Amino acid sequence: MQLLIQNGLIIIIGGLLFLAGITDIRKQMVSRRLLWILFLVCLITVPFMTNHNILSIVGGIIIGFCTIGISIASKEQIGKGDGIVITAIGLVFGARRCLIVVCIASFLMAVVAIGIVLFRRGNRQTRLPFLPAVFAGYAFCAGQVLIC
């Protein structure tokens, strides 16, 4: 029963991330309401996650807080909303899988940025939505969790 609830909540979080990614593409920002809902669902999911411990959860939260700190230090080059989403993912997946999500998202955004510059669709000042790439990384890690 616990595994069924865990898998259902992981799918709901994926749906919320997908919605946040679409909103990020369209408006270049995500509503606070959606971020709060996502964060609360992730918080509810934590007791049902059986494959990591408290240190892993704390590590995931620290990764998210570091992202928020980078956002503040870089004057919102990375949005605070992205940091909140990464913190929420860190709650659910723990440090290791949260880093995998961030690495996949960063790699995808690097490929997109190189493509944009090469095809002269923008320059280094062009702002790109990060949450769709975070969703792709989340989908990869969620697929691993759901299969196991």
Image (spheres, grey):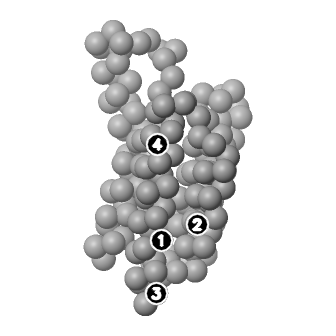
Are the residues at dot 1 and dot 4 in contact (C-beta closer than 8 Å)?
no
Task: Tell me the CA gap for discs 4 and 2.
Answer: 17 Å
Residue annotated with mark 4 = 21
> From the image, which quarter does the C terminus lie in?
bottom left
Give whichever of discs 2 and 3 has the lower sequence position: 3
Question: Residue 91 bears which disc, if any?
Answer: none
Task: Tell me the CA gap for discs 2 and 1.
Answer: 7 Å
Q: Nearer the viewer, residue 139 or 34?
A: 34
Residue annotated with mark 2 = 41
> From the image, which quarter does the N terminus lie in?
bottom left
Visible in this render: residue 28?
Answer: yes
Residue annotated with mark 3 = 2
> Mark 1: which amino acid?
Leu
Task: Tell me the CA gap for discs 3 and 1.
Answer: 11 Å
Residue 61 is situated, as x and y percent measured from the top left of the image, at 63, 59
Residue 11 occupies which quadrant of the picture? bottom left
Visible in this render: residue 63?
Answer: no
Give whichever of discs 2 and 1 has the lower sequence position: 1
Task: Tell me the CA gap for discs 4 and 3.
Answer: 28 Å
Are the residues at dot 2 and dot 1 in contact (C-beta closer than 8 Å)?
yes
Q: Secondary structure at mark 3?
A: helix
Q: At 36% from the left edge and 70% from the top edge, which residue is drawn?
A: 145
Q: Secondary structure at mark 1?
A: helix
Local crowd size for mark 3, using a 10 Å CA cut-off: few (<14), some (14–19), many (≥20): few
Question: Residue 9 bears which disc, if any?
Answer: 1
Give whichever of discs 3 and 1 has the lower sequence position: 3
Q: Secondary structure at mark 2?
A: helix
> Mark 4: which amino acid?
Gly
Furthest residue in direction top, as rendered: 120
> Mark 3: which amino acid?
Gln
> Mark 2: which amino acid?
Val
Q: With respect to residue 61, does 7 lie above or below?
A: below
